[in-house]
Image: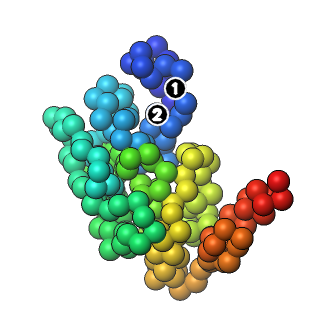
Amino acid sequence: MTTSPHLLPPQAVGQPIIYDLSKITGSLYISNSVAANNKFMLSCYNITTVINASVEVVNTFFEDIQYLQVPVADTPTSYIYDFFDPIADHIHSVEMKQGRTLLHCAAGISRSPALCLAYLMKYRSMTLQDAHTWTKSCRPIIRPNNGFWEQLIHYEFKLFSKNTVCMINSPVGRIPDMYENEVNSMMSM
């Protein structure tokens, strides 16, 4: 769902999609912190729950919206794994009540997409590779950090007893295998 430009606040018109909400499913969206604190945008998308996956972003609390905090820093050493099940369960429960969830972090690139991938694996039965492909098609800027990738790989194995993504060595360090061609292209320039 794309909001028409005449409905957006003046500062949002002409801004790249990173300033908008990215629709992942009929009831789940990802954004950055700016969009998550925009009352007009939350209202346009009928958001009923906002999940803030950051330690540094402070939400503006709007009436009739439920807020949850996932206090995780965007570093490869941050532990996000313990939040995969409870956040996926919460997103699912909001969906079952016909609500809509906005999952955000500072930029909507690493932490919130990592939680989104966990949700898609658990409740949409997607492999990690398929969940990433789907989410990236909806929000092209996603790129969970390598520590989150390692935890997502463990989570996929917990759910399905197999993996579709693995970490490999590359000229820039360990990366998910799905980024291998991208890294090789960058290195050949």
On screen, residue 84 above or below 62: below
Q: Residue at x 83, y 59 (%)?
A: 188
Q: Which color scheme is applied?
A: rainbow
Disc 2 crowd, CA 10 A, few/some/many (<14, 14-19, 20+): some
Locate the C terminus and report the quarter of the image it occupies.
bottom right
Residue 17 lies, in percent from the top left, at 53, 34
Number of numbered discs visible in the structure rendering: 2
Q: Position of residue 145 (x, y in %)?
A: 51, 63
Task: Let me know if residue 85 appears in the view.
Answer: no
Measured as percent of width and height from the top left, residue 182 is found at 73, 59
Which percent across, then down, holds residue 91? 33, 56
**Tag 1 secondary structure:** loop
Contact, mark 1 vs mark 2 (Cβ under 8 Å): yes
How far separated are the C-alphas under marks 1 and 2? 6 Å
Q: Which mark is residue 19?
A: 2
Tag 2: residue type? Tyr
Mark 1, residue position: 15
